[in-house]
Amino acid sequence: MTERLEREVGGEYNTFRVYLYLLKKKRASARDVERGLGFSSPHLATHHLEKLVKVGLTEKEDSQYRVLPKSFGVLRLFLILDKWIVPKTFFPAVIFLTMAIGFLFLLPQHPYFLIALLLSIIGLIISGYLTLQFYRLLPRT
């Protein structure tokens, strides 16, 4: 099932964009998707929405499509929190930032202060860089 999702949705740029749009909006009509993503017609949006219904990522209710959140392909690197799609590396970045600030203000006289500060700054740089790279993996919606 996951391979099918990766092939039919993850490998299709516009279908994946429609899925990301629905993840953020939770439900939308074909007209909403057309306007939100700048498609040329509602028919094109309907085509991609029906593909998502076919693979089980959305459900159609009247003229609205409701998203069924699933993690596959590149989305495994992200947490889907309500309308937010957050890279998993964001949380270590916050922890390293908190550590760096704490070491700067709370422990400047400790003998291992510089080592701890340096390690927390290195961790912050690496996790911050990875967070930005993961955001760049997602197509714009």
Image (cartoon, grey):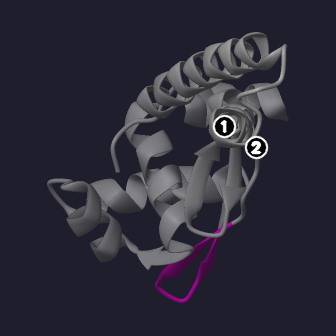
Looking at the picture, how far across and down is residue 55, in whole percent?
70, 48
Q: How many marks?
A: 2
Discs 1, 2 touching: Cβ within 8 Å = yes
Residue at 52%, 58% in the rendered image: 50
Residue at 83%, 24% in the rendered image: 110
Q: Give the quarter of the image for residue 127.
A: top right
Q: Which residue is mark 2?
A: 71
Residue 59 is at least partly visible in this image: yes
Q: Which residue is mark 1?
A: 75
Q: Is residue 80 shown above or below 10?
A: below
Image quarter of the N terminus: top right
User: What amino acid type should be assigned to the residue bearing mark 2?
Assistant: Ser
Looking at the picture, how far across and down is residue 34, in whole percent?
26, 64
User: Between residues 52 and 118, which one lies in front from this camera angle?
Assistant: 118
Looking at the picture, how far across and down is residue 19, in whole percent?
53, 52
Residue 42 is at least partly visible in this image: no
- As for residue 28 lying within the magenta part, the answer is no
Q: Which residues are magenta?
A: 59-67
Residue at 73%, 42% in the rendered image: 106
Q: Is residue 59 left or right of residue 11?
A: right
User: Between residues 61 and 28, which one lies in front from this camera angle?
Assistant: 28
Q: Give the quarter of the image for residue 100.
A: top right
